[in-house]
Image (cartoon, rainbow, N blue to C red):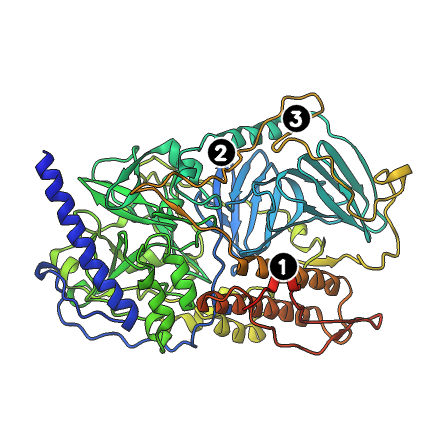
Amino acid sequence: MRQQRQQHMAQRVQLDRLAGGALSLLLATGCVTTQPAPEMAPAPVQAPAPVPQPPPRPADDPPARVARLALIDGQVSFRPAADTEWGAAVPNAPVTTGDRLWSDAGSRAELDAGNVGLRLSSATELDVVRLDDHAFQVRIPQGTVIERVRNEEGDDEEIDAPNAVVVPAGRGEYRIDVSPDGSTTSVTVWSGAADVTSAGSSFHVNARQVATVRGVDAPTFDVSDAGSYDAFDRWSEGRDLREERAAEARRYVGADMAGTEDLDDYGRWGNDPVYGPVWYPVAVESGWAPYHYGHWVWVNRWGWTWVDDAPWGWAPFHYGRWAYIEGRWGWCPGRVVVERPVYAPALVVFVGGAGPEAGRVGWFPLGPEEVYRPAYLASPGYVRQVNVTNVTNITNITNVTNVTNVTNVTNVTNINNTTYRNRMVPGAVTVVPERALANAEPVRSVAIAPTRDFLSARPVAIAPAVTPTRASLLWRGPATVGSAAGVTRPAHAPVVPPPALAARPVMALHTPPPAPVPFSVQERVLAGNAGRPLAPSQVASLRPTAPPPAILPIRPVPMLHPSVAASGSGGPGGSPATGRQPASMPVPGERGPVGATATAMPVRSTTPPAPGPVGPQRVAASPLDHAYQAERAQMEARHRAEFAQPPSGESAAELAQRHEAEHQELEQRYQQARTQGRPTLPPATPRPPATTRDGRQTTTRDKAPDRARGAD
């Protein structure tokens, strides 16, 4: 047995070296010359013509994170950003900017965005106004939401209600209640601290306090001690305790990876001498294979996206790689641990049908050290970051940024000559009719046994040449039991929120992003895009011709010059508090009424793991990261001021587009510096100052503070 094990390991190491060599050549040139093993050699096929796309820029990169619909209890509905109809929500669906959720009477739901979790109670609507790498802004026109911020510093979290804006001041747990008519908002701070803005005044709410804002046109507020838990608080606390028990998974994955608490419940960890940390699912049936129990949906920014049926089916299908180790599948998160890994819609390679196999499409999971190439437009720096945790030879990825014609690398579609270790594993390749993929049908019920010809002689591609339809946007099918874990799809017709909620205005501090372009407008262009999503510039060109979308209405808050201040007991002597006051911070995770037993939130150790041959390595923030954060904070402060008092002659839509362009320009400078290995940001291009309606001028480009810029 020992000798067989050594031979087995030697074969895997040899295969890794072969794949690594092919990987290096592919990344450096956009193709490979190494020939695969004879039994896997593809038949000669003509490479498909590349789809014309603009050169990728860092500003075109999608966000590194999305939210996961982690839990559904009862009747919960979902409306994608680009659609006008609601559908029944399913677990593990990705949620991003512009998406909307409705938790019906007696129902609950949970969103997990890594460092931020949101839990919806009964009769609650939550709309994602913005979700990107640095901001999470949501709109709550009605209902109850508990937000848990897991990081000490957090990002720019903002909760917009009809008569108040809530900004958590970092790590803590916050409950927001909005009355059915939208006239009353209560903010309960179980732990942490929050700033609440209403009618031009801001006041501070400390831990174990509740602030209540009443009225819309002339609101008043009061602050008092928080009461005792109700059933929703106790349910949420149970979810917190479950997260805290997921200690083992946090040794191997980043703190901001959603779904890590599921891994300890549904699998076991081990260390492999070749692949490093490996997680093995335990509740799977015989013959189980990754990416076989679920369905595909179309998400505009990322394209074809996998939604798995398993209750743990998030992290292993959007991060890491799968390996077939001694007769079973294991998920390999990688040896390098970053606090916020880059989300991918599905880490697979597609196999397209041709000839007798026309009308069918297949796929198989990528293995360790195999590079994921996005089907969506992305810069070389993005390609490097989305692969950095699983391709240990960083030079191979860095070579992408050094080639002259980056389009040939990031847009390559003919990758037939690459050796993929999982392609010939029994059961690894899943094949379905193209119509099943386009209609979001459950894969297990329509899967076709792949022929040997399909396995070895079909072209390999980074995207299936399947044009999405409106049915691709969300699940609309009947109830089925189609997963190894016995997950049942929703049988009920989608419930919808009251129509008045869509038109109910809310207050906000940040400018919302431009409204999404409806899928009905994009559909005509997507028909000729070979199953790949449109580039951001293509989507922007469609926006002027798009019909008026259901824009989330935002009421600006006149922060700078309040005309009427809210009254209440928030400040000394009963006067309103107009600025941040020092918070009396409790023990992290402290929650509940005075005298209640505190529940500690998990504190992530800052001590690196002990060195070892298979231990993960963590990536710390760099001086460039700190410089970027400092400049971004200045830009956000200016954006809030301009949103409160827009510059003269600039419409709300123009302001939103300008702010979005400035965000992209900052991201582009950051990625440029990161690619070049610089410790500081390159200087911004100055623009003329904008004039507000009261005659003041604001600078549209901020200079980073000297302490953050450093020396080149």
**Callout 1: SS:** helix
| CB within 8 Å, label 2 to label 1 | no
Q: Nearer the viewer, residue 533 or 577?
A: 577
Residue 224: image quadrant is top right
Q: Is residue 390 left or right of residue 504?
A: left
Which structural element holds mark 3? Answer: loop
For the residues carrying marks 2 and 1, which lies nearer the camera in this image? 1
- Judged left or right of residue 486, residue 149 is right
Label 2 – label 1 distance at C-alpha: 31 Å
| Residue placed under numbered mark 2 in the picture | 243
| Residue 352 to residue 114: above or below | below
Tell me the residue that label 3 is attached to.
229
Task: Determine the residue positioned at 70% across, 58% down.
Answer: 554
Crowding at mark 1 (Cα within 10 Å: few <14, some 14-19, many 20+):
some
**Which disc number belongs to residue 630?**
1
Left or right, residue 478 beside residue 550 = left
Q: CA distance from mark 3 to mark 1?
A: 38 Å
**Disc with the residue nearer the chain's start (2 vs 3):** 3
User: Contact (CB < 8 A) between labels 3 and 1?
Assistant: no
* Residue 439 seen in this snapshot: yes
Amino acid type, callout 2: Glu
Query: What residue type is disc 1 on?
Result: Ala
Q: Position of residue 305 (x, y in %)?
A: 39, 55
Q: Earlier in the sequence, mark 2 or mark 1?
A: 2
Residue depicted at x 14% and y 55%: 451
